[in-house]
Image (tube, rainbow, N blue to C red):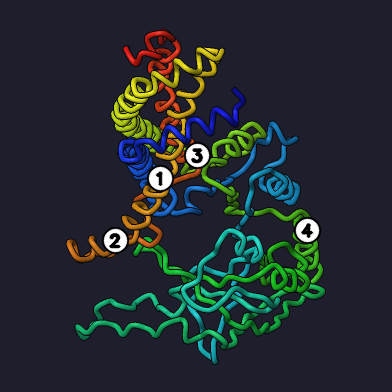
């Protein structure tokens, strides 16, 4: 018998008792759906707790503090060549940093001094955008003289405190009201030993997010690389550094002091460097590679390794429990196939009488049990996706009604990755084939004469 003939024979036999076939497929589908939905809870909770609740950038970020001078020809600090190396690594989304301007720029807004307690910080705007920098209002800078200001930029040091009169100090207005306005930055520099200054008008286009730690106050001003380079062209020093010059020094001595500083500031260094991986699973490999290259790093992923192990054990346990449900469903497949062998004894006898090979008869019954497993797996997968969608949609409503609390944004209770579906279907089909193996062997051992007499 050809494969096509065997398949046609199986389809005809399956149609003889549709009710029994339906109940067997239904049991297999329920077992497969139970396995997928149960395991999906483990995947969903891991994604929500590790990736969402802990924070995506917090998990995928690798902080690079410095490097081992013994492995880098006696050189300390993160420099341009190091930044280029970081960006060349595979699975790196972006490399960010925060460099402080090394002089007080005395910012003013509409004639009033701005108390930016965090100083002026230069960012790589493009890299920050790739890393997913969030703002509480406005947008990221697009022009050289556009800046972002900290969330607490308008908050003075005595906001919220009790004054001498016993009243509470007035809270300042929201910093978002400054979006679109111009801020004046005063850059000081030396020309032939004489101190000069230039006012740079910077447009505020965005407000940084509020720090998660309540005691942290973000009063910084964030500028891009183009504005930093404009400042450096004026000062002639890296990061706009202004040398401290004693009043009693002569013009010649002052010029010499400035020249020494400018000579030492040729190679830019970077501070608060953070490498952002494309995925949390890539952090471990990147961290090890950086350590091997002599960089001193820290990653939160190092702290959550144990959490991932716990989730893996939990998911493995849930898959095991779900597999038990599929095995229970296999009892129905075994019963169905055993009854099929009994009912088709005459057909088996005829096939043997006309010279059918026992292996072909065995393949027919294994094919039938395999088709039951495939249909059950397909239906179970569709049902599991529907249940997962319903649970994720209904859980926030249930939590809100029962606890009067909001589910964290991005929280997923049930997540079904493709490989979980593949694993579950493989288990369901494999169990179905094993369930039909014994009845198939029994069919091969049927005696021709007894089968033709319908006497088993």
Mark number displayed over residue 394: 2
Q: Which structural element holds mark 4?
A: helix
- How far is the residue under mark 2 from the one under mark 4? 68 Å
Q: Which residue is mark 3?
A: 419
439 versus 326 height, above or below: above
- How far is the residue under mark 1 from the one under mark 2? 22 Å
- How far is the residue under mark 4 from the one under mark 3? 62 Å
**Sequence-first disc among 2 and 4:** 4
Q: Find residue 91 and report its horizontal and vertical position in percent.
A: 64, 45
Q: Which structural element holds mark 1?
A: helix
Q: Are marks 4 and 3 in contact (CB under 8 Å)?
A: no
Report the front residue among 24 and 352: 352
Q: Which structural element holds mark 2?
A: helix
Q: Which structural element holds mark 3?
A: helix
Residue 39: tell me if it is visible. no
Q: Are marks 2 and 4 in contact (CB under 8 Å)?
A: no
Q: Is residue 27 left or right of residue 281?
A: left
Which-is-in-front pick, marks 3 and 1? 1
The residue sitting at 55% across, 62% down in the picture is 132
- How far is the residue under mark 2 from the one under mark 3? 25 Å
Q: Are marks 1 and 2 in contact (CB under 8 Å)?
A: no
Q: Which residue is mark 1?
A: 379
Which-is-in-front pick, marks 2 and 4? 2
The residue sitting at 33% across, 28% down in the picture is 336
**Sequence-first disc among 1 and 2:** 1
Q: Which residue is mark 4?
A: 260
């Amino acid at each position: 018998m050809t494969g096509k003939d065997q398949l046609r024979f199986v389809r005809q036999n399956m149609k003889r008792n549709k009710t029994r076939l339906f109940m067997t497929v239904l049991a297999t589908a329920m077992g497969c759906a139970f396995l997928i939905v149960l395991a999906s809870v483990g995947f969903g909770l891991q994604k929500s707790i590790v990736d969402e609740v802990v924070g995506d950038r917090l998990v995928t970020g690798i902080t690079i503090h410095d490097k081992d001078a013994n492995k880098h020809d006696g050189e300390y600090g993160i420099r341009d060549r190091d930044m280029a190396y970081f960006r060349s690594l595979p699975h790196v989304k972006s490399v960010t940093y925060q460099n402080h301007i090394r002089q007080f720029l005395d910012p003013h807004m509409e004639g009033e001094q701005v108390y930016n307690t965090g100083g002026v910080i230069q960012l790589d705007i493009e890299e920050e955008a790739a890393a997913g920098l969030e703002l509480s209002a406005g947008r990221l800078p697009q022009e050289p003289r556009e800046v972002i200001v900290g969330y607490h930029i308008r908050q003075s040091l005595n906001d919220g405190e009790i004054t001498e009169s016993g009243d509470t100090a007035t809270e300042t207005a929201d910093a978002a009201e400054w979006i679109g306005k111009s801020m004046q930055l005063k850059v000081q520099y030396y020309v032939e030993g004489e101190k000069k200054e230039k006012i740079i008008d910077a447009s505020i286009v965005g407000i940084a997010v509020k720090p998660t730690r309540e005691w942290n106050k973000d009063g910084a001003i964030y500028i891009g690389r183009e504005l930093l380079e404009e400042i450096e062209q004026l000062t002639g020093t890296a990061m706009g550094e202004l040398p401290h010059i004693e009043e009693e020094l002569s013009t010649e001595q002052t010029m010499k002091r400035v020249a020494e500083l400018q000579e030492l500031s040729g190679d830019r260094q970077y501070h608060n460097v953070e490498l952002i991986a494309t995925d949390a699973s890539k952090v471990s490999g990147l961290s090890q590679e950086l350590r091997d290259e002599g960089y001193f790093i820290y990653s939160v992923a190092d702290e959550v390794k144990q959490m991932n192990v716990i989730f893996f054990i939990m998911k493995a346990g849930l898959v095991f429990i779900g597999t038990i449900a599929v095995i229970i469903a296999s009892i129905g497949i075994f019963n169905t196939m055993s009854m099929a062998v009994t009912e088709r004894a005459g057909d088996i006898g005829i096939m043997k009488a006309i010279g059918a090979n026992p292996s072909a008869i065995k393949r027919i019954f294994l094919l039938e049990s395999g088709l039951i497993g495939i249909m059950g797996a397909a239906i179970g997968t569709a049902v599991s996706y529907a249940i997962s969608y319903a649970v994720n949609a209904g859980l926030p409503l249930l939590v809100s009604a029962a606890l009067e609390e909001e589910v964290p944004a991005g929280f997923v209770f049930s997540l079904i990755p493709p490989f979980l579906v593949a694993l579950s279907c493989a288990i369901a089909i494999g169990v179905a084939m094993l369930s039909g193996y014994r009845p198939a062997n029994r069919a091969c051992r049927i005696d021709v004469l007894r089968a033709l007499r319908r006497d088993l």
